[in-house]
Image: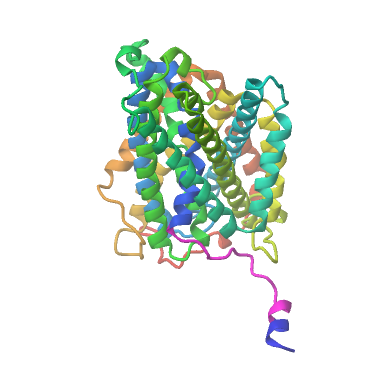
Amino acid sequence: MTAQSIAASAPQKNSLLKVLGPIHVWALGVGIVLVGEYMGWNFSVGKGGAYGSLIACWIIGLLYTCVAMIDSEVTSTVAAAGGQYTQAKHIVGPLMAFNVGLYLVMAYTMLEASDAIVVGDLIKTIALQYGAEVDTKPFVVLTIAVLAWLNYRGVFMTLTVNFVITAFAFIAIIVLFFAVEGVGTGGSILRHRELLTDLPYGWIGVLAALQFGMWYYLGIEGTCQAAEEVRSPGRSIPLGTMGGMITLLIAATLTWYICAGLMPWEYLGQAITPMYDAARLTGILELEVILFVGTIFAAVASANGCINDASRAWFSMSRDRYMPQWFGAVHPRYRTPYRAILFLIPIAVSFAFTGLLDQVITFSILSGLLGYTFMSFNVVRFRRMWPLGTINRGYVHPFHPIPCILLGLLCGATYFATYLGYGASLLSIMAFYILISIWFVVRRYQFVRRGDQFTMPWPRPKGY
C-alpha cells in the first residue's frame, strides 16, 4: 500500500482544521456585529432619544470591552470549539455548560434570522422605489441557503469571504462620514444643532436604550468559536477580538453621528435600514449604491458568521453527548461540522419568516446577555481554580477583578432595561431556559460522560 492509500484508509479524527489567523478572527467577530451599525441600534433612539442612544452606545461599549478582555484570556487558554460552552464545561459543570451552549446557539440563530429579514426588507424597499412589489421570503431562504453552503464547504473560505465583505461594509461607513461632512464638496450637510433634542423620556429612557445599545456590538464574543481552528490561539484570539472591538467602537460612534445629524429622532427610532436612508438623504446616487451594497454585505457577513458560530456550539455539545451524538460528525473532506450546519437552517428560516425584527433581535439579545452574565463569575472561578502561574495562558487580561464586576453590574442594568420594553419576552425566554434545564437533568444528563469532559492538560484545580 502507498502512503496515500494508508492515509485515506485511516479513520478520520473528529476534529477541525487549524487554518485561521488573526484577520480571520477579526472577520468573524466584526463580520457578525457590523450589521448592527447598519440597523437595529437605532431602536435605542426610540427608547431614549438621540443623546440617550449615544450614552447607551458608550456604556454598552464598556460592557463589551469587558467581555472581549475576559474572553481573550479564557479562550486563548481553553482553545477548543464551542467557546464559552467549552469554558463552562471545564470550569463550572455540565448543567451550566448545557445552558451556555444553548445561549450561544439561540443568540446566533436569532441574529442570523434578523440578518435575513434585513436583506429581504432592503430588497423590498428598492423594489418599491421602482414601483414593484416583491415577496421577501425567497430572498430570506436564498441568503441562508447560500451561506450555509459556503460554511459547509470550509471555514477558511467562509471567513476569507467574510473578511472581504466586512472590510467593504466598514469602509462604506467611513466614505459616508466624509461625504456628509462635505470633504471635497464644500460643506457639511449634517444638522445636529437643529435635530438634537434633550432626553425626551429622561434618564429612564437612557436606561431603556441599553437593550438595543447592545446591537452595536452583539456577537463580538463569537471570535471564541474559532479557537479550535486558529493556528496560534494565544496570539490570534486576543488580537482578533480586541482589534475587532476597537473597530466596532469607531464604527458605532460614526454611525450615530451620521444618522443623528440627518434624521429626526422620531423617524430614526423606527427605521429599518437607517444607514441606507442616510445615504439616500444626501441625494448622491453613488453613495446610495455604496450604502446599499454595504448594508447587504454587512447583513450577509453577519449571517455567515452566525452560521459558523451556532454550528460550532451545536457540534461541540453533540460531540460531548449533551445533544444527540449524530450532530457531532465532521465532514470527511471539508472537515466542517456539516450536520450541525444543516440542522440549524430550518430553525433560522422559520424565525426569519415571522418578519418581527424587533422581537427576533430581543430574543438574540437576551440569549447573549445570559451568556455575558455567566462570564462575569466564570473568570473569577477560573482564576481561583488555576491561579496565575499554574497553567500556561495565551493572554492575561489586566485590572482583574474590575472587568468582571463592571460586566455583572452592566448586565443587571440591561436586564432591567429589557424588562421595561419587553417584559413578556424576558419572562418567556427565562421560562424556556428553566424548562429545558429540567429536561436536560431528567432525560439527557444520563448520556453525558463526565470523565470525558475534561480535555485540557492542566494540573488538578486548587482546592480539589
Where is residue 169 shown, x and y percent of the image? 48, 41
Q: Residue furthest bottom?
A: 1
Q: How is the image coloured?
A: rainbow
Figure check: 384 above or below 141: below
Image vertical order of residue 343 relative to residue 215, above or below: below
Please name the residue shown 39% across and 62% down the image.
234
Give me the residue at 43% from left, 61% from top.
Answer: 233
- Viewer-side residue, 461 vs 265: 265
Question: Could you say which is closer to the camera, residue 285 or residue 427?
Answer: 285
Q: Is residue 58 left or right of residue 362?
A: left
At horizontal 48% and vertical 44% (from top left) the residue drawn is: 168
Q: Is residue 336 visible?
A: yes
Q: For residue 66, which quarter of the picture?
A: top left
Residue 27's spot in the image, x, y percent?
A: 48, 50
Q: Main secondary structure of the magenta part?
A: loop
> What's the magenta region?
7-22
Q: Position of residue 198 (x, y in %)?
A: 31, 12
